[in-house]
């Protein structure tokens, strides 16, 4: 016999969807508090996933915006205890530095996550020939090396 609750969505799925919806609509002044509230959820993996999606979405809006630095500092304080999230925010900051022509080191790129290398190789905002050349030569995966080579060939002269 099938349970009458067979088709119900698990509670953590509903909370995840609600968190994403709330994070998308939150005012900037309330964002840190909401992120902290989401991270206090009993399901740490689900909470990290919701906040990670939020960080990725917000960063794409702020990546070249001067407000990025203050926002990243605030988020760093809120997510300080979450290794994955702090790592992701650090890598977004590195992408920003490359995109804006600020300083970065080769080893930051070569030791970065597969996600970072793939994003840097394919993200149109990253136009640094040096960074793309490094990824084309020393990217961790063939996909990253190929994407970086393609981007290098198509950079305006």
Image (cartoon, rainbow, N blue to C red):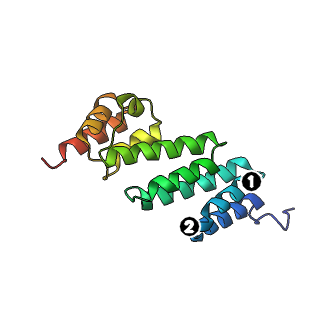
Q: Are marks 2 and 1 in contact (CB under 8 Å)?
A: no
**x 30%, y 42%: residue:** 147
Residue 39: x and y in percent read 70, 53
Residue 79: x and y in percent read 63, 48
Residue 66: mark in rendering: none
Q: Does residue 27 appear to the left or right of 151 in the view shown?
A: right
Location of residue 9 by image quarter: bottom right
**Toward the viewer: 67 or 45?**
67
Location of residue 110 by image quarter: top left
**Toward the viewer: 142 or 133?**
133
**x 61%, y 55%: residue:** 51
* Vertical placement of residue 28 versus 140, above or below: below
Residue at the extreme left? 157
**Toward the viewer: 94 or 114?**
94
Residue 40: mark in rendering: 1
**x 51%, y 56%: residue:** 71
Q: Does residue 153 appear to the left or right of 11 in the view shown?
A: left
* Vertical placement of residue 145 versus 39, above or below: above
**x 32%, y 48%: residue:** 99
Local packing at callout 2 (Cα closer than 10 Å; few below 14, some 14-19, many 20+) is few
Residue 28: mark in rendering: 2
Mark 2: secondary structure: helix
Q: Nearer the viewer, mark 2 or mark 1?
A: 2
* Vertical placement of residue 29 versus 56, above or below: below
Rounded to the nearest angstrom, the CA distance separating label 2 from label 1 is: 19 Å
Q: Quadrant of the N terminus?
A: bottom right
Mark 1: secondary structure: loop
Residue 68: x and y in percent read 45, 56
Residue 116: x and y in percent read 44, 41
Local packing at callout 1 (Cα closer than 10 Å; few below 14, some 14-19, many 20+) is few
Location of residue 8 by image quarter: bottom right
Q: Which mark is first along the chain, 1 or 2? A: 2
């Amino acid at each position: 016999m099938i349970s009458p609750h067979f088709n119900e969505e698990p509670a953590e799925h509903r909370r995840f969807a609600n968190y994403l919806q709330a994070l998308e609509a939150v005012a900037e002044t309330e964002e840190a508090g909401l992120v902290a509230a989401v991270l206090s959820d009993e399901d740490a993996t689900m909470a990290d996933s919701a906040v990670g999606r939020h960080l990725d979405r917000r960063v794409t809006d702020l990546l070249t915006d001067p407000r990025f630095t203050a926002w990243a500092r605030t988020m760093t304080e809120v997510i300080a205890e979450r290794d994955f999230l702090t790592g992701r925010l650090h890598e977004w900051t590195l992408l920003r530095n490359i995109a804006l022509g600020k300083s970065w080191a080769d080893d930051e790129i070569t030791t970065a996550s597969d996600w970072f290398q793939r994003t840097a190789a394919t993200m149109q905002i990253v136009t640094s020939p040096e960074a793309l050349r490094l990824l084309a030569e020393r990217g961790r995966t063939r996909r990253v090396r190929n994407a970086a080579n393609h981007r290098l060939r198509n950079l305006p002269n």
